[in-house]
Amino acid sequence: MNLKITTPLTKEIARSLKAGDIVSLTGVVYAARDAAHKRMIEALAEGKDLPFDITDAVIYYLGPSPAREGQVIGSAGPTTAGRMDKYTPALLAKGLRGMIGKGRRSDAVVESMKETGAVYFAAVGGAGALLSKHITKSEVLAYEDLGTEAIRRLYVEDFPVIVVIDSEGKDLYDRKRNTL
Amino acid sequence: MREIDVSLVTNAIRDLCIEANYGLSSDMEKALADASVNEESELGRSIFSMLEENLKIAKEDQIPICQDTGMAVVFLTVGQDVHFTGGSLKEAVNRGVAQGYEEGYLRKSVVGDPLIRENTKDNTPAVIHYEITEGDGVTITVAPKGFGSENMSRIFMLKPADGREGVLEKIVEAVKDAGPNACPPMVVGVGIGGTFEQCALLAKKALLREVGQKSSLPHIAELEEEAFKKINELGIGPAGLGGSTTALAVAIETYATHIAGLPVAVNICCHVNRHATKEL
């Protein structure tokens, strides 16, 4: 199915999405990758708040290249999601509803997604120039010292993704592999 | 004896870092275009058209092809009759990388210590491979390497008894394990022989070979072809979403090895297989 979805991503919308759905995403998403995840988990362990409201939020695993003058952002494609697996169940428990990345997720992440009703989308890796055209606003929100790994609040318009793992744990990568 | 000022090395490396990140070599462009026509999956074909559009935008709007503009891997082939003047060659290389990544709006993706993990903020140091050869020429190749695919690369210390079949099995296994993480369609660089470290370097060098060019050794060219076929039968497809194109090429480099060993390294590269070369 081809769908147009806007964020925040409610549990109802998330539950309606199925592995294989092709989605155009519009609204706020948060860019965060390895180092930002580490800090967020450390903040939670210390009883502190996260730098943004994670309830029904979508995180994009992204570290963009620098923008030229007049550009919103530089190249902005997905990074490998599996590196965030260690940190992800704790964020899902706090209300994280969607993730955009590429590549496989761990069993623990998929189990957490099923429990909390979350969705994992893939964007096309290595298409960062094209994907940057769907990002209309970008601002650094937290951890600026991390450079490209800072948390950014992005506004995306008709951002092209595909549902790879849905809230029932159906996995498009696995299904393809299983049919070999 | 030919004297070369190291500032020429700096300038060349700066330009090559930028060139490699904004456009693919013509053989890579052709391989992608050919594969997009032959891809059997409809979704796969639509991903190919996104990748072609991406290359066009990168060139026209000056946005790097991929946000992971890589760790700079620099190959310096230096004639033994060359004398570098004007300072440290290594510093000249790193200065070129720092300038290229700053002036080219490329992402700084290097941490100075693998455990402390603080970004060096200028993408240095580069990984530099020096090779001394005859004559007085200097050839510089910059191959920025993204880590989505680098992380999925593997090395296997096989037994001689594992033979050709064992090697083939491991190449296919590495690609299968890499799957969607390595941004397929991939270019697969393989090293066979040598020692542990040289085998890995051979695999890296194999990625520099023109896509579609076969090994000059008939038995290796045959192995490349067989591996290529088996990899594309895996069905991983563009972006790992299924299809008939998982690899764009398999290139194998070999070297002599020990009577007790059969090292095999598989260096996987995504479809953004970047490299640019200049001779001084």
Image (cartoon, coloured by chain):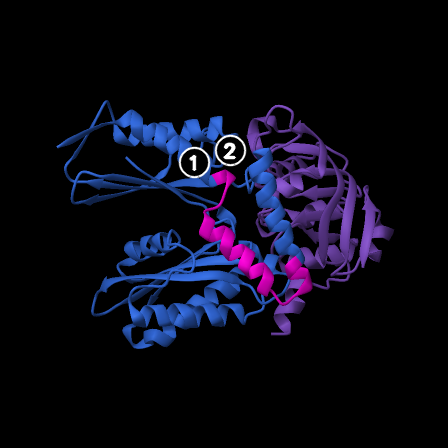
Q: How many marks?
A: 2
Q: Which mark is residue B17?
A: 1
B194, above or below A42, in the image: below
Task: Quote the CA–CA distance across marks 2 and 1.
Answer: 9 Å
Colour chain B appears in? blue
A47, above or below B226, in the image: above
Q: Are marks 2 and 1 in contact (CB under 8 Å)?
A: yes
Residue identified by numbered label 2:
B106
Colour chain A appears in? purple
- Farthest left residue in view: B1
Which residue appears at 46% of the width and 31% of the height?
B101
Q: Is residue A45 left or right of residue B27?
A: right
Q: Is residue B22 magenta?
A: yes
Closer to the camera in the image, A75 or A114: A75
Q: Residues within 10 Å of mark 1 (few under 14, many from 20)?
A: many
Chain name for mark 1: B
- Tell me which amino acid carries mark 2: Leu
Image spot of residue B209 (x, y percent): 37, 54
- Tell me which amino acid carries mark 1: Cys
Badge 1 element: helix
The range drawn in magenta is B21-45
Image spot of residue B176 (x, y percent): 52, 65
- Farthest right residue in view: A12
Closer to the camera in the image, A126 or B135: B135
Which residue appears at 42% of the width and 26% of the height?
B99
Chain name for mark 2: B
Closer to the camera in the image, B235 or A153: B235
